Image: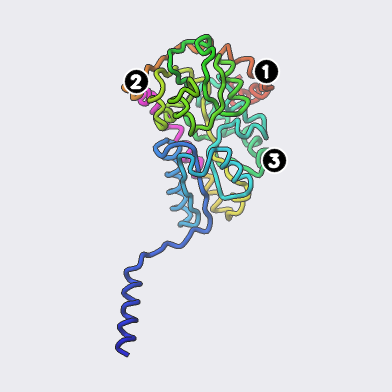
Amino acid sequence: MLKSRVIFGAVLAGLALAPVHVLAADYSLRLGTVLAPGDPLVVGAEAMKKAVAERTDGKVEIQIFPSSQLGDTQDMMDQAQAGANVGTFVEASRVSVYVPQFDVLVAPYVFDSVDQLAALVESPTYDAWNKALEDKTGLTILSFNWYQGARNLLTKKPVSGPEDLKGVRVRTIGQPLWIKTIGAMGAVPTPLAWAEVYPSLQTGVIDGAEAQPSAIRGAKLYEVVSDVTVTEHIYLMTGLIVSAKWLNSLPEDLRAIVVEEAQKAGAGVLKANVEQADEIFAEIEKTGVKVHRIDTAPFRKAVEPVYEELGLTDMIKEARGAIGAN
């Protein structure tokens, strides 16, 4: 009897010392990105994760996987399209293969300011594009206001106009709009995954790249280039895309919370990236990299044929009309 009591007491003691496990969430989203942990989009995703957990009493859990842990952007899109509980950040040309109008969001020099672009992605015109995307692919965008910043050229020599990019191999996203844009700007477009940019610049596989300030800092690209040219050829607005099947599996109240918090987090990221751009350029200059602010008119003129080549002229007119920018 005494032996039994000793064993029972030991069991109780073990239970008391055992870690307390929180019950698993009813729903979970694996949110992956190619960006580094300190990038504003990742910081925004962490804020969204916390807000969703609090507002849903832990019923919805968002897990964050930065630095390509779930694969490249296309890999994550494919998983989401298959119905998996995976989400990622996409720029517009990733989904324009299904709904061509999305290319307007990332076409070079279409908008006069990021505020115009922000207005468009909150308009009924944009909502119709997202509905068409869901109908065609089973993918849906929770919010498209995750602004990453304006894209600028990164090279190993000074650049002041398209003529300086002749023969220069510049990394680009492997989508037609990006390839056409970089080619029209005078360079040799070279599609590569984002994770390959740093080593490819380091080894000379490519001669340059283009990126927004936060990504230049996050990927430490200032270590492998000598010059940054502020072309701001694309305002890179990003969408948080998920499986519509996964989203619709959530009860209506939880679904509304997830969408609302995606919008709030995106707005926070937009504000942060606008405010910190000049600060990042100043940090980059302290490393010895030269930051050139140029007259972008030659580049603006050079990319105009891209609109017609890709059939964007009427779409751009419609989009600008939707925000009263004609």
What residue sits 63% from the left and 44% below the top? 81
Task: Tell me if residue 266 is in the magenta stretch.
Answer: yes
Q: Residue furthest bottom?
A: 1
Measure the alpha-carbon separation of dots 1 and 3.
25 Å
Measure the alpha-carbon separation of dots 2 and 3.
46 Å
Q: Which residues are magenta?
A: 261-282
Q: Residues at badges 1 and 2 in contact (C-beta under 8 Å)?
A: no
Considering only order in the chain, which callout, 3 or 2, is on the residue closer to the N terminus?
Answer: 3
- Helix, strand or loop at mark 2: helix
- Helix, strand or loop at mark 1: helix
- Helix, strand or loop at mark 3: helix
Mark 1 lies on residue = 308
Q: Residues at badges 1 and 3 in contact (C-beta under 8 Å)?
A: no
Q: Residues within 10 Å of mark 1 (few under 14, many from 20)?
A: few
Mark 2 lies on residue = 285
The disc at residue 36 is none
114 or 89: nearer the viewer: 89
101 or 87: nearer the viewer: 87
The three-letter code of the residue at mark 3 reads Lys
Considering only order in the chain, which callout, 3 or 1, is on the residue closer to the N terminus?
Answer: 3
**Residue 33 in picture, x, y percent from top left:** 49, 40
The three-letter code of the residue at mark 2 reads Glu
Q: Main secondary structure of the magenta part?
A: helix
51 with respect to 250 (left or right): left
Task: Tell me if residue 210 is in the magenta stretch.
Answer: no
The three-letter code of the residue at mark 1 reads Glu
Mark 3 lies on residue = 136
